[in-house]
Amino acid sequence: MAASTFVPVSLDPPLVAICVQNTSTTWPRLAQQSRIGISLLGVDHESIVRTMAAKDIDRFTGVETETHCKGALFISGSSLWLDVSVDEQLPAGDHAVALLRVNEIHCRPEAEVPIEPIVFHRSALRKLMTT
């Protein structure tokens, strides 16, 4: 699943949040897992982001993944992995805000660094402009 909103929330306890559409058929299955993998992707991963966001195809076709020993699934080649657990879900209109407790952080030094962020804005993937 591709999350269009990802934000850090707290250092103590370590929490991040994502926003999930109420119509998602993937999130209810993920939310039941004890561990979920978040892979931070950038502009070089646009095709993977599009594949993960698709609804009517196998989202893992052509996507290399790695499974952590505690069950979280990650996308190979991303620069940072967060092993998280659902802490709380809050209704927010046509979305839910999922607060996720960070169990472990895995920096991937072999991934391309620095990774340029990719953002979803006005229904399109965009690069941030730098000066």
Image (cartoon, rainbow, N blue to C red):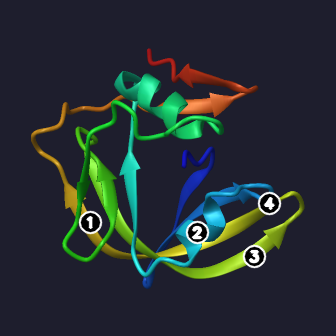
Q: Residue at x 33, y 36 (%)?
A: 63
Local crowd at mark 2 within 10 Å, few (<14), some, or many (≥20)?
Answer: few
Residue 30 picture quarter: bottom right
Q: Position of residue 90 (x, y in %)?
A: 75, 76
Q: Secondary structure at mark 4?
A: loop
Q: Which residue is labeled 4 in the image?
A: 22
Left or right: residue 89 compared with residue 101 = right
Q: Residue at x 63, y 82 (%)?
A: 88
Disc 3 to disc 1, C-alpha distance: 24 Å
Left or right: residue 101 compared with residue 71 = right
Identify the amino acid type marked 2: Arg
Residue 130 picture quarter: top left
Local crowd at mark 1 within 10 Å, few (<14), some, or many (≥20)?
Answer: few
Q: Position of residue 107 (x, y in %)?
A: 19, 54
Identify the amino acid type marked 1: Ile
Q: Position of residue 85 (x, y in %)?
A: 45, 78
Q: Which residue is labeled 1 in the image?
A: 105
> Which comes before the other along the chain, label 1 or label 2?
2
Question: Which residue extends farthest left?
Answer: 110
Identify the amino acid type marked 4: Asn
Quadrant occupied by the C terminus: top left
